[in-house]
């Protein structure tokens, strides 16, 4: 039987991989740390696929994010770090192939959205997502388009006037993902509630654009 920890090495000054199998990369335990020594992220993976639970914390040690994995999907939970209340909860499902390519143009904002090709294993958003206020009251529920999008936004000239994206020299680059220009677009019906749990309004979306 293998020992619980076969190899211990540091990938960087703030990250540690614990190899849990003789074969490198087959079974690993990953931990990263904030500069103050507090854990920032921790998870397990086999053959590059995460399992069990992934957690993220703030520099104060407050839980910020959690992913709970099964064989083919995982539950995504964001928290209000100060109160520990759930901010957002929803599900991702594993998909063997990427979802359809889709380009969306928002004529109201001039933003252009392009399907982002996810890395394998590819997870897509599924089902109803819920968002809550800091007191734990349900604020809104709804679905998203399954795929993630990169987007370009209009730039402004020296006078502050917005220039349509198609009239600029801005080029999409793979580095855009590292700039955080990734998002999900709403789909179908989104329902909003007040702090009494009473429905206040509904919004309707089709292929990422709001209809009414």
Image: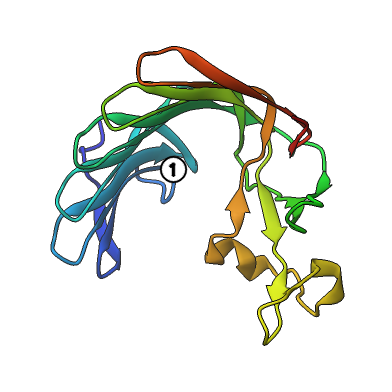
Q: Is residue 181 left or right of residue 88?
A: right
Residue 116: % across, % down = 70, 50
Q: Residue at x 34, y 30 (%)?
A: 133
Q: Is residue 19 visible?
A: no
Tally of numbered discs? 1
Q: Residue at x 68, y 39 (%)?
A: 147
Of residue 185 and residue 43, the one placed in the foreground of this image is 185
Give the vertical position of 105 relative to 204 (above or below): below
Q: Is residue 68 left or right of residue 171?
A: left
Give the vertical position of 42 relative to 70 (above or below): below
Of residue 129 and residue 59, the one placed in the foreground of this image is 129
Residue 207, picture quadrant: top right
Q: Is residue 168 visible?
A: yes
Give the vertical position of 91 relative to 5 (above or below): above
**Quadrant placement of the C terminus:** top right
Residue 208: % across, % down = 74, 38
**Quadrant placement of the N terminus:** top left
**Where is mark 1, residue-wise?**
26
Residue 175: % across, % down = 62, 69
Q: Is residue 57 left or right of residue 148?
A: left
Residue 137, picture quadrant: top left
Q: Residue at x 20, y 51 (%)?
A: 39
Category of crowding for the residue at label 1, using alpha-carbon neighbours closer than 10 angstroms: few (below 14), some (14–19), many (at least 20): some
Secondary structure at numbered mark 1: loop
Give the vertical position of 54 relative to 157 (above or below): above
């Amino acid at each position: 039987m293998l020992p619980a920890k076969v190899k211990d090495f540091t990938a960087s000054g703030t990250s540690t991989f614990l190899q849990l199998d003789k074969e490198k990369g087959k079974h690993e335990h990953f931990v990263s740390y904030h500069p103050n020594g507090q854990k920032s992220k921790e998870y397990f993976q086999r053959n590059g696929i995460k399992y069990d639970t992934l957690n993220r914390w703030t520099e104060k040690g407050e839980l910020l994010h959690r992913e709970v994995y099964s064989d083919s999907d995982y539950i995504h939970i964001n928290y209000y770090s100060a109160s520990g209340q759930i901010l957002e909860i929803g599900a991702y499902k594993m998909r063997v192939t990427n979802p359809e390519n889709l380009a969306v143009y928002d004529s109201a904002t001039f933003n252009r959205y392009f399907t982002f090709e996810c890395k394998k294993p590819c997870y897509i958003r599924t089902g109803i997502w819920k968002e809550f206020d800091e007191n734990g009251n349900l604020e809104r529920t709804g679905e998203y388009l399954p795929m993630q999008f990169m987007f370009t936004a209009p730039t402004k000239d020296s006078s502050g006037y917005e220039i349509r994206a198609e009239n600029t020299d801005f080029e999409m680059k793979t580095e855009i993902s590292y700039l955080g220009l990734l998002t999900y677009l709403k789909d179908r019906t989104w329902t909003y509630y007040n702090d009494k749990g009473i429905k206040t309004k509904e919004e309707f979306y089709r292929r990422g654009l709001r209809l009414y």
